Amino acid sequence: MLLFVGLGNPGRAYAGNRHNIGFMAIDAIARRHGFPSPRARFQGLVSEGNIAGERVMLLQPQTYMNESGRAVGEAARFHKIGLDDIIVLHDELDLAPAKCRIKIGGGVAGHNGLRSITAHVGNDYKRLRLGIGHPGDKALVHSYVLNDFAKSEEPWVEALCAAIADNADLLIKGDDAGLQNRLHLALEAKGFGAVKRVGEK
């Protein structure tokens, strides 16, 4: 079994936040691949289904971002899922909006959700980094990630999440380069090849 973890904060107040793009991507995967409605388990919302012939668990921790690792640790221990089979989808300040990169391990770059997961299960899990851009000033980061995507951003967010869902089989197969290329082409085809962050000229 593979474990796909989307990071975000629970509750309607946070649903549209930039910090919640991981939740949004998981929702898109669930819809695209016909997963059942999630249920409360492992301190998160969980749904299980099949993608490209592989059993996949979708997990959205409900512990708030800073404690995401508690849910991931519980699910991984219960199902004996190793780090090689954990893929975390999360917002990435250091990537331009709509850009995606995949990496295994490495630093957490100040991301409290990643820091918590690393503390609970170790560091060498795969991360699908979903670019949201940087506000340009470190002092603005907290309010930036906890604010909703602007109306002007919603089209690329929806397009990116849809492209991830459409190409989730490449995540299953471990074709990281192929996935990054497909996502780039899908966003470019919809005119989101050079998205600017809000307020950027």
Image (cartoon, grey):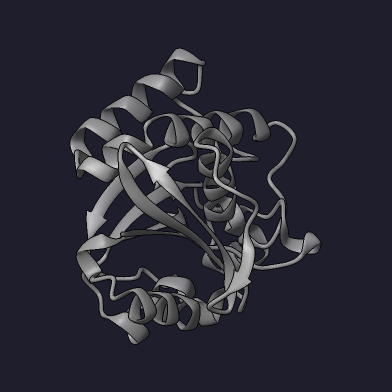
The residue sitting at 51% across, 16% down in the picture is 190
Quadrant of the rendering where the C terminus is positioned: top right
The residue sitting at 19% across, 38% down in the picture is 175
Percent x, y of residue 60: 55, 63
Q: Locate residue 178: give its quadrant.
A: top left
The residue sitting at 55% across, 45% down in the picture is 35
Relative vertical location of residue 171 with respect to residue 196 in this rendering, above or below: below
Q: Is residue 200 visible?
A: yes
Quadrant of the rendering where the N terminus is positioned: bottom left
Say left or right for 180 vs 14: left
Residue at the far right in the pictured view: 13
Query: Toward the viewer: 39 or 126?
Result: 39
Percent x, y of residue 85: 26, 61
Say left or right for 174 vs 158: left
The residue sitting at 20% across, 45% down in the picture is 174
Q: Locate residue 110: give its quadrant.
A: bottom left
Percent x, y of residue 6: 49, 58
Relative vertical location of residue 50 with respect to residue 47 in this rendering, above or below: above
Query: Toward the viewer: 99 or 56?
Result: 56
Relative vertical location of residue 34 with respect to residue 36 in this rendering, above or below: above
Query: Toward the viewer: 78 or 103?
Result: 78
